[in-house]
Amino acid sequence: MVVKGVIKNKVYFDSVSLMRIGSELSSMEGVEDVAMVMGTNENKSILQVSGMLLSEFSDSNGNDLLIGIKANSDEIVSKVLDKMESLLESLQKGDSSSTTFVPKSIDGALKTLPQANLAMISIAGKYAANEARKALNRGLHVMIFSDNVSIEDEISLKKLGKEKGLLVMGPDCGTAIINGVPLAFANKVRRGDIGIVGASGTGMQEVTSLISNFGGGVSQAIGTGGRDVKKEVGGIMFLEGLKALKNDKNTKIITLVSKPPHQEVIDKIAFELKGCEKPVVALFLGADKEQLKDFPAEICRTLEETAQKSVELSLQLSLMREVDFTNDDILKEKAKKTSNQKYIRALFSGGTFCDEAGILLRDHLKEIYGNHSGKGILPLENLFMSQKHTLIDLGEDDFTVGRPHPMIDFSLRNKRVIQEASDLECSVIILDVVLGYGSHPAPDAELAPIITKALSINPKLTFISYVVGTDADPQNRKQVISALQNAGSLIVSSNRVATLFALEIVK
Amino acid sequence: MNIYEIGDRLPIGNFSLHSKFNKYHNFINEYGELATVTTEKSGPNTITVSENLLKYSDFLVVTDKNLQINFNRYQKNSIQTYNSGLYIDVLKDECEDINDCWFKTMIELKKIYNYLKIKDENRTLLSIINFEKLISLKKSTHIQKNLTENINNKDNNLFSVEKKYKFSELVYKEIEDGIELFLNKQFDLAIPKIKGHGFGLTPSGDDWLAGALTGVSFYEQFFQKKFKTMKESIFALSKGKNLISNSFIYFAKESSFFYDVKIFLTSLLKKDYDSLSILGVNVLEHGATSGGDFLSGFFAVLLKKEFFSN
């Protein structure tokens, strides 16, 4: 056994990087152990115990990085040292090797692109309001992707935007399509005459995608951020967006998509719609009939119905659609179940889908649990453990803080799929797969192997998936659908159909 | 090139660059005091700046009235100050029976500890150390044993990863032994086993000690009591040659907190439990492993029932 080492003076790396590199080097053929630590006396005492304290380490201190290697031969030690140098070098390059010019301020960005008229702000929430204010004062419309902006700032920004005749989409606005350009998490949809104002990101993605897939097209999709329709903000931007669509000559149909706004905001929207010459389709997901009594619009109950109604008004025809599943399909799935398999487990990456599924199921099933509050939905005791029928929005902060959104990072949902598959009471797993800009570039590569693995654990399980997006999206929609089908998932066209299909199987 | 905020305990002096990370530049003055220029959230000794300014932050001068980063000079009174203290009187605010309130706070602490431990995924001391066993131990089981004896006695393992005793396992094993002694208030034996141990610029053990002192500060604030002697003796034993660790541990002793920690503690004191999981994760995600190591110390002293009894 050979023990060798090197000292690197005043070189600093974070602990995870050191542990990761140490672990990678330790796993090399012929290597017994590798230590990469700062040269504190305390670390040196452990190096001694592990037989890696070399005489050359004796003068080192806490500012020095010590690397100790225990291996079968000198030759292996030099291989380890070479690999370590290249790993440390790539780590350092990763910190500062970018040579592309990236503007660091709004003024810098405007110098690069003076004709810009919209600023997308995606920085820590604490600083977002300040930057948004700067953008508005320079005459730019603003889309604030950042969350954690105070409600006071939101109100003041929206008042400033209104005063200047500029849109303030957000904070926490995930989706918009302006003049055909998808912003943040959005899909490549046909252009057309349906204008949308929405306070629901994934809701807008499903509605715009279905509109496109049904043959219609979108003029503008203006996101407002979910808080806009609360009493405190008073729907300032929802109303401004609505006014913009009323005045937009390319918009012939106006579609509204939101969770239920506060009653005062509903009244303001209704007032704004009085005398509107354009047909209006509205989805206030989960709103009571009483709340929308006398509301001057075609009221819809689901995202799919909203898209369909909008297209029918736009194209002046009744859409004849093929059914996604038949009685035979239901009976076939039911026949393979054990008596224990009773429950639906819906693992969503989009929050609005979670709400919509809850609304569709609550009148038919008891004991529905989830992490979104709502009529008929009981709170989960432990978010990481399903109970009975469970509807989970994996995009909630509890799951996403410190990791990317589940539309980008599938790891958490994949783990959960395997967890559900191992539960003998689980009968149906519903998955949404959201395509478009911002989302994972190849979701099928992540999901298909997991579906296959889950079905090998429990072959009697039913997977129902739906793919939110269009054939023009950067991902290959047809390939995604085909890969999921080949893995063993049933594919339907919308969240509504997925939910109802699952309901029929467990009823 | 903006400065957004400066910490209320930013030291004065001529600083030279100590270490550079993507989002932090650490500076040390002639008295060995630390100031950090960062694009992240504020702390007692930080200067929070735009990315552009951080890029050009190579030297720093702080006077009573001004501060200068490279050749850019700013008046301190024109910059917002971050207040790092906690000024919440639980008794006055909404707590009729302090013991009852503490009991409820402990329930929430236990819940958030369990949640964060899962989120940590075996990255830091928070989930690597077999904590439940440590806090339930009445007396230290191997106070007199040294490191080598502990390693040879593999059956006495409290450590939750595989028993190979390779280098990284040895590091954590030593810290774990130290924590057991610490929770039995044998600080003179415990702290040498904890401080300076671990990976990265601020070793895990140092972050743990800062967390433990923060736990003591939190308890002081809750009960409006002072544990000055205990804190001073922990600090004196914890001080080492690592200037950055010394600074973290000093501010923890002084009840002066970084933004995420302050907001987390404030929510606990104000019984605003709804956002506690998010705020806890913000602390957990601080640095590469520092946040989790820090939280491990914080939870340890508060969840060990006997720690504050005589």
Image (cartoon, rainbow, N blue to C red):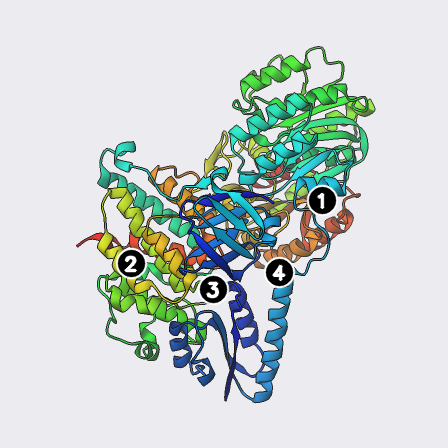
- Same-subunit check for callouts 3 and 4: no
User: SS class of the residue under badge 3?
Assistant: loop
Say which element carries label 2.
helix
Name the residue at 57% across, 58% down. Answer: A457
Mark 3, chain letter?
B
The correct choice, above or below, for A375 with respect to A44 in the image is: above
Q: Which residue is mark 2?
A: B135
Instruction: Report whether A464 appears left or right of A182.
Output: left
Please give the residue where the numbered disc 4 appears in the rendered image.
A95
Callout 2: chain: B
Distance CA(mark 4)–CA(mark 1): 26 Å
Chain of the residue on which disc 4 is drawn: A
Foreground residue, A413 or B26?
A: B26
Q: Which residue is mark 3?
A: B201
Q: Nearer the viewer, residue B43 or B214?
A: B43
Q: Earlier in the sequence, mark 4 or mark 1?
A: 4
Image coordinates of residue B236 in percent, x first then y, are: 29, 62
Separation of residues labelled 2 and 1 (CA atoms): 48 Å
Question: Which element carries disc 1, helix, strand or loop?
Answer: loop
Mark 3 Cα-neighbour bin, 10 Å: few <14, some 14–19, many ≥20:
many
